[in-house]
Amino acid sequence: MLFLCLCSALVVTAAQLVQDDLTLTRRLGQTVSFSCAGTGQCDYDYIFWYQKKETETFRAILYINRNSGYIGKGYGHPQENDFSPVKGKGWELQIEKVKQDHSASYYCSCWIISSHRTWNYDVFGSGTKLMVTDEQVVKPVVSLYPAASSSLLCVASRMVPPRVRFSWKRQKDNGPAEDVPSAGDEQLELREPGRAASILLLRQPEDGPYKYSCSVQHEGGRVEARTRAELPAPAASCPPSRRAAEPAAVQQEAELVPVDPVQSRYQVKLLCLLYTALVVKSLVYCCGLSLLRSLRDQGPSAADYSRPH
């Protein structure tokens, strides 16, 4: 249990730098730049960049002095001369002419001193995947369904490239839309070839029903689906009739797609596999962060950060 808690803490730490681009699609010979925002929180002057290919582990590419733009290439990466820094919101990583072998995910990272100033820890971006292909970018088809008596299922499918990011908002009557609070309704995700899904487990609201919307971020743009969810009132002391006990959880608006038998089976599959996937994901993150820390130890030491270049 302690191990899983530690992994969760590391995952939270690993998401503190901001890489807004989930994917970037380029043809051979085009230029691409990977952004990394939020570096003002870094306590040292260096931003590190890593490459992660599908069948390989993380590899350090180079580090950039965010004050001077100095590049350190002491990691022996075979493509290190293909990369250069570009001054943007932070120091971006650029490839002047992409090759097929550049297809990979790219992560930025930096060091932060602990509040007690006794040790350093890494913070990372969420990563940007470079797709080197002639295939056209296609926005996802997004559908919103009731998954159970008190949950919503948002499915994104048919998108190219396949990577998306989900977010949920809620709205009370004609009031302003607000992010679903993390301390309230729980959000779970599952991905498989050809589609991705997010499940929102609804809690009993204290002040009535909300209208919920699921927003899907994709390289081709943002797509949104909406519904109105009404949770049943708390159980009375006398057992309600069968009809009254039936789920009144979700009343969909006209634009939503009706649930078909295939979709229903998919919902059941999602709910069954979800928690297993989350546990495996946490373990993979832990192993990945351990490898990255090992790679970092092979690079410049903490003492090097105080030396001007």
Image (spheres, helix red, strand yellow):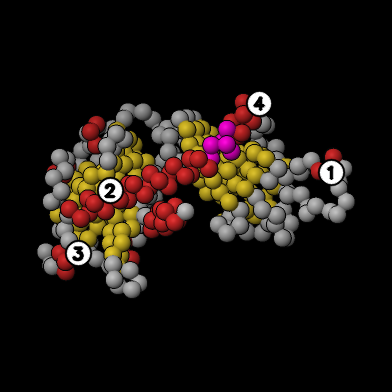
Which residue position is annotated with label 2?
291
- Residue position marked by numbered label 3 in the rendering: 302
Residue at the spot x=64%, y=30% of the render?
A: 264
Q: Magenta span has 272?
A: yes
Give the mark nearer the N terminus: 4 vs 3: 4
Q: Is residue 216 visible?
A: no
Q: Answer yes or no: is residue 171 visible.
A: yes
Q: CA distance from mark 3 to mark 1?
A: 65 Å
What amino acid type should be assigned to the residue bearing mark 3? Ala
What element does badge 4 sit on?
helix
* Left or right position of 17 against 261: left
Mark 4: amino acid: Pro
> Which span is picked out in magenta?
269-274
Per the image, label 3 sits on a secondary structure element best described as helix
- What type is the residue that disc 2 sits on? Leu
Task: Measure the C-alpha gap from mark 2 to mark 1.
Answer: 55 Å
Residue 213 point in image, percent of width and height? 60, 47
- Residue that label 4 marks: 261
